[in-house]
Amino acid sequence: MASTVHIPLVGGAADGQTVTVELDSNGRPPLTHHHLGSGGLAEAQIYELESAGEQAREWRYRWTGPAV
């Protein structure tokens, strides 16, 4: 079973929400998260992974804009 982690979303329509993602074989989450809107992928918001602190395994997804 793959390990998972909860990562907060910062900015955009999903600001303040948290997503659960699987970690890869190196213990890192995906570099991007596509947060689906009510219209599915047509209204998705893109979030990019960034470090949230100096401790290992502290991440957040920062909003970069709509998937156009």
Image (tube, helix red, strand yellow):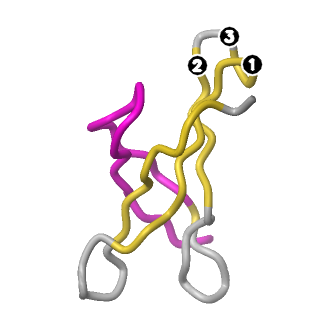
Q: Position of residue 31 (x, y in %)?
A: 61, 65
Quadrant position of the N terminus in the picture:
bottom right
Circle 2 Cα neighbour tier, 10 Å, few/some/many (<14 / 14–19 / ≥20): some
Q: Pointer 3: what residue? A: 39
Q: Position of residue 67 (x, y in %)?
A: 70, 33
Q: Pointer 1: what residue? A: 42
Please tell me whether mark 2 sits on a helix, a strand or a loop.
Answer: strand
Write down the region rendered in magenta. Answer: 1-21
In the displayed structure image, the side of residue 55 where residue 57 appears, left or right: right
State which quadrant residue 11 falls in. top left
Q: Position of residue 55 (x, y in %)?
A: 25, 87
Please tell me whether mark 1 sits on a helix, a strand or a loop.
Answer: strand
- Residue at image point 62% right, 65% down: 30
Residue 4 lies in magenta, yes or no? yes
Q: Mark 1 and mark 3: span between their CA atoms?
A: 6 Å
Please tell me whether mark 3 sits on a helix, a strand or a loop.
Answer: loop
**Which residue is more in the foreground, 25 or 67?**
67
Question: CB atoms at circles 2 and 3 under 8 Å apart?
Answer: yes
Residue 64 lies in magenta, yes or no? no
- Residue at image point 59% right, 11% down: 38
Question: CB atoms at circles 2 and 1 under 8 Å apart?
Answer: yes
**Which residue is more in the foreground, 6 or 67?**
67
Q: Pointer 2: what residue? A: 37
Q: Mark 2 and mark 3: span between their CA atoms?
A: 5 Å
Question: CB atoms at circles 1 and 3 under 8 Å apart?
Answer: yes
- Residue at image point 58% right, 19% down: 37
Q: Amino acid at mark 1?
A: Ala
Which comes sooner in the sequence, label 2 or label 1? Answer: 2
